[in-house]
């Protein structure tokens, strides 16, 4: 079981380390609001991964195969949410006055940051498909449902460590200093990244509905 866990964990860590919506969400909060808020986004991402691991282990992976419309729905919801995040960044850039780390336009609660991370993951169809594949590999290696469920906190903790590290990296003095000098351009970049990812998911979902 240990060798299967290590192989799976290595693959999961590599996948989580790649740029994507979760990384962008953590980086944008770390740069504009600091390390602590970014850690709550990372906690939300890790919780989303925990939930995906458990529900896939309990059989939703099979549902994804039988009912592909679930993935289509996730694309529409996730795409819309990412576009909303992108528009929010563009509104910040348009505002015309710099943002201070300690005095954000509307001070967000820890819960809102946590929720952002969780929603980004839970509405990401790529995450659903990845964990369905991970579960299939684990089951194919002889693990039971409850063993896979039992491993879910390990994957969640590994995810948190990755994204918390990103949060630390993007909240360093150099990173924040650069952001404060070029905050408007940075927000435009984040807005375009969120918007592009969201539009890609949204159009893919609409295309699947049209073809269906």
Image: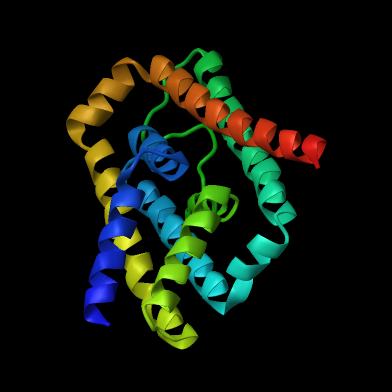
Residue at the (49%, 84%) spot, across then down: 145
Residue 109 in view here: no
Q: Is residue 78 above or below residue 110?
A: above
Residue 60 is situated, as x and y percent measured from the top left of the image, at 62, 70
Counting every numbered tag in the picture gives 0
Residue 56 is situated, as x and y percent measured from the top left of the image, at 55, 70
Residue at the (62%, 29%) spot, across then down: 199
Residue 173 in view here: yes
Residue 177 is situated, as x and y percent measured from the top left of the image, at 24, 24
Give the position of the C terminus as an image quadrant.
Answer: top right
Residue 149 is situated, as x and y percent measured from the top left of the image, at 45, 80
The residue at the far front in this view is: 140
Which image quadrant is residue 34 in? top left
Residue at the (34%, 33%) spot, across then down: 31
Q: Is residue 153 above or below residue 28?
A: below
Q: Is residue 120 above or below residue 4?
A: above
Which image quadrant is residue 88 in? top right
Residue at the (33%, 42%) spot, across then down: 18
Give the position of the N terminus as an image quadrant.
Answer: bottom left
């Amino acid at each position: 079981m240990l060798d299967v866990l290590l192989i799976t964990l290595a693959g999961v860590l590599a996948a989580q380390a790649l740029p994507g919506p979760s990384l962008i969400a953590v980086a944008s909060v770390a740069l504009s609001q600091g390390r602590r808020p970014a850690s709550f986004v990372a906690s939300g991402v890790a919780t989303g991964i925990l939930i995906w691991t458990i529900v896939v282990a309990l059989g939703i992976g099979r549902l994804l195969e039988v009912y592909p419309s679930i993935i289509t729905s996730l694309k529409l919801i996730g795409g819309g949410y990412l576009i909303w995040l992108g528009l929010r960044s563009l509104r910040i850039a348009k505002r015309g006055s710099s943002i201070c780390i300690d005095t954000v336009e509307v001070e967000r609660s820890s819960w809102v940051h946590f929720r952002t991370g969780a929603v980004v993951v839970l509405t990401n169809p790529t995450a659903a498909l990845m964990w369905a594949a991970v579960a299939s590999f684990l089951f194919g290696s002889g693990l039971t449902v409850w063993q896979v469920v039992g491993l879910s906190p390990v994957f969640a903790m590994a995810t948190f460590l990755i994204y918390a590290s990103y949060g630390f990296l993007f909240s360093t003095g150099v990173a924040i200093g650069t952001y404060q000098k070029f905050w408007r351009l940075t927000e435009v970049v984040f807005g375009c990244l969120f918007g592009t990812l969201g539009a890609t998911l949204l159009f893919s979902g609409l295309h699947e509905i049209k073809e269906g």
